[in-house]
Image (cartoon, rainbow, N blue to C red):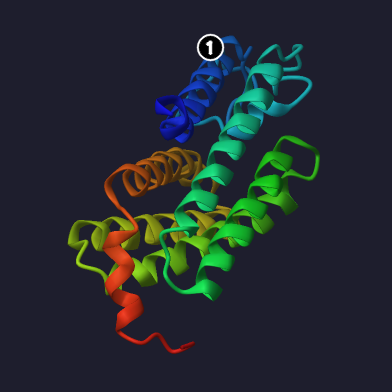
């Protein structure tokens, strides 16, 4: 039972460890300097780890580590959304969080494929909608710290998506990691420090769908 309780944390820990290993074995090269050596956290994108060859032209041994890491991360997100949906008292909203959130993780994993750009848009949109639904219920609750945390995470994610669309890749390389960290903090905080009881009073307050 204890292992099941910490599945999301364990999955994320292992996945992050694998991605970190991938950065250590990445040969080199970035969008800004094809001859750079190794993985630069301020210049390289996580997607550089997925390619068959590194940007400097060498074989890329980081690929397998990164692919497995992203797969486990996607599964961890899916488990979170499925589990958290059970804490939401409104059936419609719970289904959105469960199916859109968990379903979007399939597209999250597909970012390791040549469909990377398209999957970023699809998975990012599905994640944002799911977190937005969760945020609505957090705002109705008495979880004051989580109100700040949810809104901050959403703003960071929105800003990063804006940079992606506008083509400001230099700042995007940094914001990608900031978004990744904020996403993990939000998910694990919601997983461990909220309960079904935190949202139960909302059901008695007559939701619009009731």
**Label 1: few (<14), some (14–19) or many (≥20) C-alpha neighbours in 10 Å:** some
Give the residue pinned by disc 1.
24
Name which residue lies at 38% across and 66% down.
Answer: 135
Q: Write down the quadrant of residue 35 in the picture.
A: top right
Q: Is residue 129 left or right of residue 118?
A: left
Image coordinates for residue 87, horizontal then vertical, percent: 41, 59
Image coordinates for residue 60, horizontal then vertical, percent: 72, 15
87 vs 188: above or below: below
The answer to whether residue 31 is visible is no
Q: Is residue 146 left or right of residue 81?
A: left
Q: Is residue 63 left or right of residue 194?
A: right
Front-lying residue, 16 or 60: 16
Name which residue lies at 79% across and 22% down.
Answer: 52
The answer to whether residue 198 is visible is yes
Image coordinates for residue 136, horizontal then vertical, percent: 38, 72
Q: Write down the quadrant of residue 103 in the picture.
A: bottom right
Q: Residue furthest front?
A: 1
Image coordinates for residue 29, horizontal then vertical, percent: 63, 21
138 vs 63: above or below: below
180 vs 16: above or below: below
Front-lying residue, 183 or 55: 183
Q: Secondary structure at mark 1?
A: helix
Name which residue lies at 46% across and 74% down.
Answer: 90
Q: Quadrant of the N terminus?
A: top left
């Amino acid at each position: 039972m204890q292992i099941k309780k910490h599945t999301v944390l364990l999955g994320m820990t292992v996945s992050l460890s694998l991605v970190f290993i991938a950065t250590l074995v990445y040969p080199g090269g970035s969008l800004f300097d094809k001859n750079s050596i190794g993985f630069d956290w301020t210049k390289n994108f996580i997607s550089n780890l997925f390619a068959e060859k590194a940007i400097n032209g060498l074989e890329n041994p980081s690929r397998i580590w990164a692919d497995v890491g992203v797969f486990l991360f996607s599964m961890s997100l899916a488990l979170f959304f499925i589990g958290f949906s059970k804490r939401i008292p409104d059936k419609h909203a719970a289904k959105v969080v469960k199916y859109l959130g968990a379903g979007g993780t399939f597209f999250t994993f597909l970012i390791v494929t040549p469909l990377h750009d398209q999957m970023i848009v699809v998975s990012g949109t599905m994640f944002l909608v799911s977190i937005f639904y969760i945020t609505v219920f957090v705002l109705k609750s008495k979880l004051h710290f989580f109100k700040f945390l949810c809104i901050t995470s959403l703003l960071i994610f929105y800003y990063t998506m804006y940079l992606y669309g506008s083509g400001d890749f230099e700042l995007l390389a940094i914001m990608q990691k900031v978004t990744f960290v904020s996403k993990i903090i939000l998910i694990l905080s919601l997983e461990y420090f909220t309960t079904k009881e935190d949202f139960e009073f909302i059901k008695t307050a007559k939701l619009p769908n009731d």
